[in-house]
Amino acid sequence: MGKTRGKTLGISDLEQQEKEKAKMRAAKKKELKKKAEPEAEPAPVQNKPAEAKKKEKATQKSAPKRSRGKKYSLALKKAALKKVYSFEEAIKLLKEISFEGFSASVEIHLNLVDKDVKGEVRLPHGTGKELRVAEFGPEVETKIQKNQLDFDILLAKPEDMKSLVKYAKMLGPKGLMPSPKKGTLVEDLNAAKKKLAAGNIHYKSEPKFPLLHQVVGKVSFGEKELLENMTAFLKSVGRKNIDSAFVKTTMSPSLKLDISALA
C-alpha cells in the first residue's frame, strides 16, 4: 500500500512539472513570435487639398484690408456727395479731387449694352498725349526685328503687308499692327499723319466684355476743352450703345455721368 501511494504521488509531481514546463515553453514561444512580428506602421497622414488649406487659413486670419492714402480718402468723400453728375459738374469736381503729382489723364469708362463697339472720332483738342508715329520701312523693320518698338502708331501702305505679316504675332497683341479699320494701313501716309495730329482716335471695346476705356484729355486742359472732348467721344459711341458711363483721372475715384442728355 505504502509503495503504491508513493509511486502515484511521484507520477503526479512529474505531470505537474511537465505542465509547468509546457506553459513556460508556450509563453516563451509566444514572446519570440511577438518579437519576430514587424511593428504596425502608423496610418499615413492625408494631405489636405489646397482649397481646404486656403479656407482654413482664411478662417484663422482674415486678409488685411487695402489701405488708401489720405488724399484719396478725401477725394472719395467729395466724390460721394452726389451719385450722378452732369458733364460740367464732373469736370469741375475732377479738377478739385485730382491729387496726382503729374499731368494726369482724364479717362472715360463705359459699360456697354453689347460687345463689339468700335469707331473713329476726332477729339477737338486731342488727348494731350504726344503720339510717336512711325512709317514702315527698312529702318523700322530692323527695329521690329530687334523688338525695339519705340512708337505708338505704325503707318504702312497696303503693299507693305507682305513684309509685315511675319510680325503680326508681335505687333498684333500690342495694337500696333497696321489696319484699314484703324486708319493706319493707307495709301496716303501724309494724310493719315494729319488726321492723327488733328486728334482723330480709333476706339474699340474689350474683346470679350462689353467695356470700353478711352483717354479724352488731361486734367491740365480747360473745362471747356474737356467738355468738348467728352461730348464728342460719347456722341460717337452713341447713347443707344451705352449702359452707364464714368469719368476719372489716372488715380482719382470715378464719377458716374448723367448720360440722359446725350442725343
Image (tube, grey):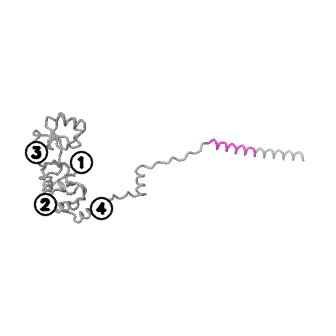
Three-letter amino acid code of the residue under disc 4: Lys
Q: Which residue in the protein does label 2 denote?
A: 261
Specify the amino acid type for callout 1: Lys
Write down the residue under mark 4.
70
From which residue to which does the magenta span run?
20-37
Q: Nearer the viewer, mark 2 or mark 3?
A: 3
Residue under label 3: 194
Structural distance between the alpha carbons of marks 1 and 2: 29 Å
Q: Does dot 2 land on a helix, a strand or a loop?
A: loop
Q: Nearer the viewer, residue 41 or 146?
A: 146
State whether residue 71 is above or below residue 162: below
Q: Residue furthest right?
A: 2
What distance separates the C-alpha of mark 3 from that of mark 4? 44 Å
Quadrant placement of the C terminus: bottom left
Left/right placement of residue 261 relative to residue 34 reads left
Q: Residue at the location (50% across, 48% down)?
A: 45
**Between marks 1 and 4, how big is the CA–CA gap?**
36 Å
Q: Mark 3 Cα within 10 Å, few/some/many (few <14, many 20+)?
A: few
Q: Which residue is mark 1?
A: 208
Q: Are marks 1 and 3 in contact (CB under 8 Å)?
A: no
Q: Is residue 137 visible?
A: yes
Q: Is residue 1 visible?
A: no
Q: Nearer the viewer, residue 214 or 28?
A: 214
Q: Main secondary structure of the magenta part?
A: helix
Gap in angstroms between the C-alphas marked 4 and 2: 35 Å
